[in-house]
Image (tube, rainbow, N blue to C red):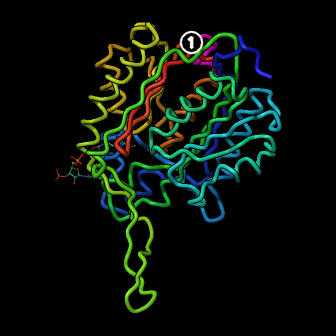
Amino acid sequence: MVQQTQLGVSWVGCGSAHPAMVLSNTDLSQVVDTSDEWITTRTGIQQRYLAQGGESLSALAAQAGQAALEMAQVDATGVDLIILATSTPDDLFGSASQVQAALGASQAVAFDLTAACSGFVFALVTASQFIRTGAYRTVLVIGADMLSRWVDWTDRRTCILFGDGAGAVVLQASDRDRLLGFEMRSDGTMNDCLTLAYGSEPQTLMADKTVQQGTFQPITMNGKEVYRFAVKRVPEVIEKALFRGGLTAGDIDWLVLHQANQRILDAVADRMGIPSERVISNMARYGNTSAASIPIALDEAVRSGRIKAGDVIASSGFGAGLTWGAAIFEWG
Ligand code: UT7
């Protein structure tokens, strides 16, 4: 039973995983008309990890989840809820249950949450509400994506950006609430700017009856529009989340943004007056791993000792939907 006093959220572990295969910018220049110089200058990305045949989204997610549980010293059977933020499940009915089975989290209910690159922040906030109400005590939140499955590998404007990976955190009920503030937003009027849309054709069942069947079409993106959106909306949503927590930008120890483009990270930090040494960036090695990018960056910063217990982290995800959101929390 959850004690009435334990309705706060604490962060007790994190983990991450990526496929073994590396695709460098130079490799990519053999696939499409691009160069290491263009990609590095425009995005900050130098390489990305890509899944190979036989590697599944759920296995990668489970690997990240396992690492997070080990850091938290929580047995899988002690997990009450698993939320898997992904847009690239192995199974359109959801991949969270496969992760639950792989981890042996027999007591946990598990479900997928889809909000593209905002997925991890939205999942973090969702998980926290279950803890705050006292419904669940231990929640595993995983962000995992394999956008390599859906990238148009002939489109140099998009294929240079994405990589595959998974990251996870374990949240637990605690006396003190370390989720200090959050804000989530959507704007479906801008949906066309970034899509992985279903495309179909009629299949005739009988003379006068058809059904629509097809598959999802490769990613399309209006890069300039999404760039403008991110640079404007991300500082706004972080400010709102800070306001809700009675905080200001000066209270932020670490900015852990969705790793979409180094120029976006720099512009957001600049607008908010946050020095560059307070901005966590690993996109040079990972590219944009969608829902996985924030927890992977967080995990690396925690394991390297940069982020320490008590540090205030401003995280913000943004992307398709369009969706965007921020969560301000104290690590530990
Ligand atoms: O996670 C979801 C969120 N997504 C994002 O946040 C993405 C946001 N957008 C961006 O990061 C940037 O818009 C991109 C990195 C995608 C593109 O950078 P850009 O500075 O906006 O470049 P651009 O699309 O304006 O293209 C500039 C030029 C064009 O040539 P022209 O028309 O000026 O002759 C492109 O054809 O660069 C050309 N170009 C390339 N050249 C070499 C576009 N892609 C490439 C490429 N290699 N890969």
User: Helix or strand or loop: what does disc 1 sit on?
Assistant: loop
- Quadrant of the drawing holding the C terminus: top right
The spot of residue 259 in percent (x, y) is 44, 36
Residue nearest the viewer, comparing 132 with 159: 132
Q: Which residue is mark 1?
A: 311
Disc 1: residue Cβ within 8 A of ligand 1's nearest atom: no
Q: Which residue is drawn at the image coordinates 58% and 18% (left, top)?
A: 306
- Quadrant of the drawing holding the N terminus: top right
Residue nearest the viewer, comparing 273 with 312: 312
Amino acid type, residue under disc 1 in the picture: Asp
- Bounds of the magenta segment: 305-310
Q: Is residue 108 left or right of residue 313?
A: right
The answer to which quarter of the image holds residue 77 is top right
The answer to which quarter of the image holds residue 260 is top left
309 drawn magenta: yes
The spot of residue 80 in percent (x, y) is 74, 35
Q: Which residue is drawn at the image coordinates 53% and 53% (left, top)?
A: 146
Magenta region, mostly helix, strand or loop? loop
Residue nearest the viewer, comparing 237 with 157: 237
Q: Which residue is drawn at the image coordinates 42% and 19% (left, top)?
A: 241
321 drawn magenta: no
The spot of residue 186 in percent (x, y) is 36, 37
The spot of residue 118 in percent (x, y) is 45, 38
Q: Is residue 318 above or below residue 128?
A: below
Q: Is residue 225 left or right of residue 313?
A: left
The answer to which quarter of the image holds residue 64 is top right
Q: Is residue 291 left or right of residue 226?
A: right
Q: Which residue is drawn at the image coordinates 74% and 39% (left, top)?
A: 66
Q: Residue furthest bottom?
A: 207
Please tell me how many numbered marks the rendered image carries: 1
10 Å neighbourhood of mark 1: few (<14), some, or many (≥20)?
some
